[in-house]
Image: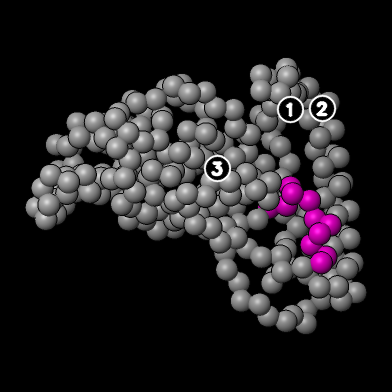
Amino acid sequence: MSHTPAESTESPDSAAASFRSEVTVELVKHSAADSDVLWAARVSTAGEQSLEELQKDPERSKGLINYLMRDRHGSPFEHNSMTFFISAPIFVFREFMRHRVGWSYNEESGRYRQLEPVFYVPGESRKLIQQGRPGKYVFVEGTPEQHELTSRVMEDSYRRAYEAYQEMLAAGVAREVARSVLPVGLFSSMYATCNARSLMHFLGLRTQHEQAKVPSFPQREIEMVGEQMEAHWAELMPLTYGAFNANGRIAP
């Protein structure tokens, strides 16, 4: 999110580090409904009369939406908007921002504010062990000892990094310089705005699903974000969402 640059005279506090294993996604605002797809599609044959679709029951046009999805007529799915507020580790956002078409982002800035000591530690359900070669591998459960080691080492590293960050801030080093010692497991926050077509492309790559025709192998943490965004979208555009799943979860 955007912040206005400002000089700060406060000294960094000694807040204790906190650790999280969950990401959060909030639907901030939206203009998204199945009817948006219908009038956008029918303008090609009905011209100005396509505006009448706004007053019709979208259920009547379930077949049209499925046709558009199946035959990959994608532009009618772009006439809508969803804005999410996402809190996740920095390494998730670095992957997220590889999605550029149909997306807008604003992330909190380590230049303009002191970053909070909130860090990511995998939960017990997070698979830790990678087996196989690149491009053909799977993740399997870790042992209790491996989970304990992962949590302990990560937490110790995070604390040392944040102490170094505070030390530099207290000595007058600029925030944009001091932040360099902080790890990618630090939580950040951002607004992300997209349309249904760009979200479908994201979900096709960043989530695993039994109805997907093309397999995907996302990192679990970005998949956690995708799952929450998908749940919000499914409520807003149920017919479009149903057609997406029925046609193999491939973006049109």
Type of amino acid under label 1: Leu
Residue shown at the point (82%, 45%) measured from the top left: 155
Query: Between disc 1 and disc 3, whose residue precedes?
Result: 1
Label 2 and label 3: CA atoms lie apart by: 25 Å
Q: Which residue bears the numbered disc 3? A: 225
Q: Position of residue 18 (x, y in %)?
A: 75, 52
> Looking at the rendering, which quadrant does residue 141 occupy?
top right
**For numbered disc 3, what is the local secondary structure?**
helix
Q: Nearer the viewer, mark 2 or mark 3?
A: 3
Label 1 and label 2: CA atoms lie apart by: 8 Å
Q: Are marks 1 and 2 in contact (CB under 8 Å)?
A: yes
Vertical relation: 181 (above or below) 242: below
**Where is the C terminus found, in terms of image quarters?**
top left
Residue 89: tell me if it is visible.
no
Vertical relation: 176 (above or below) 32: below
Identify the disc placed on residue 91: none
* Residue 180 included in the magenta stretch of the image: yes
Type of amino acid under label 3: Val
Residue shown at the point (62%, 34%) measured from the top left: 220
Q: Which residue bears the numbered disc 1? A: 128
Q: Dot 2 surroundings within 10 Å: few (below 14), some, or many (20 or more)?
A: few
Taking 154 as reference, is 247 left or right?
left
Q: Which residues are magenta?
A: 177-187
Taking 133 as reference, is 240 left or right?
left
Q: Position of residue 224 (x, y in %)?
A: 57, 38
Query: Between disc 2 and disc 3, whose residue precedes?
Result: 2
**Where is the N terminus found, in terms of image quarters?**
bottom right
Q: Position of residue 179 (x, y in %)?
A: 79, 62
Residue 146: tell me if it is visible.
yes
Identify the disc placed on residue 146: 2
Query: Between disc 1 and disc 2, whose residue precedes?
Result: 1
Residue shown at the point (66%, 19%) measured from the top left: 136
